[in-house]
Image (tube, helix red, strand yellow):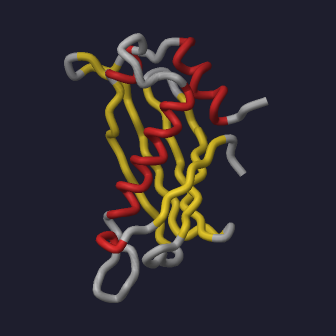
Amino acid sequence: MSGFSCPLRVRWGEVDAQGVVFNPNYFAYADVAATEFFRAAGVLTDDHPDMAQSYVVDARASFRSSARFDDLLDMEVSLPRIGRSSYELRVDIRRDGQILTDVSLTYVRALEGRSEPLSDAYRAMLARVAAPD
């Protein structure tokens, strides 16, 4: 289990005619989880240019099972990779402990279209939330 998780309840407008979550909504769920992860890390302020200059450059999902209306989901966020100018967040979307979908989001820090190194302080803040004491 990762160091960070947050809950989300499936709303009626997120399910399709079969009563299951419409697949693109899992990316919206991952975005909610990533935002809460960044909030917990303390980087959602103007004081952290690394965050303001980070963009998702790749998003992938693996679907294993479906969530349904009113399911309570647990979104576990981990930081499997942090490089010089990019990092990956993985969001495991679970119901009752079972992984339904895992989403991988790759971010890169860029200025004027060119990648820039992440600061050591930013790396430390992300790592602290991903793997707390």
Where residue 92 appears, x then y in whole percent?
A: 57, 57
Q: Observer-nearest residue: 64 or 6? A: 6
**Going by the picture, which residue comes out furthest to the bottom?**
18
Q: Is residue 127 left or right of residue 16?
A: right
128 to 14, vertically: above or below = above
- Decide which of 30, 57 is in the foreground and name it: 30
Which image quarter: residue 114? top left
Give left or right: position of 13 versus 95. left
Q: Position of residue 40 (x, y in %)?
A: 56, 31
Q: Nearer the viewer, residue 39 or 80?
A: 39
In percent of width and height, residue 17 lies at 29, 87
Position of residue 37 relative to residue 123, above or below, is below
For the C terminus, the quadrant is: top right
- Residue 10 located left or right of residue 72: left
Point 58% across, 38% down: residue:
79
**Residue shown at 69% from the left, 41% from the top:** 3
User: Exactly how many numbered labels are in the figure?
Assistant: 0
Residue 57 drawn above or below residue 30? above
Residue most extreme to the left: 112
State the residue at coordinates (47%, 22%): 43
Residue 23 figure quarter = bottom left
The residue shown at (41%, 11%) is 47
Across and down, in percent, residue 22 comes to 33, 73
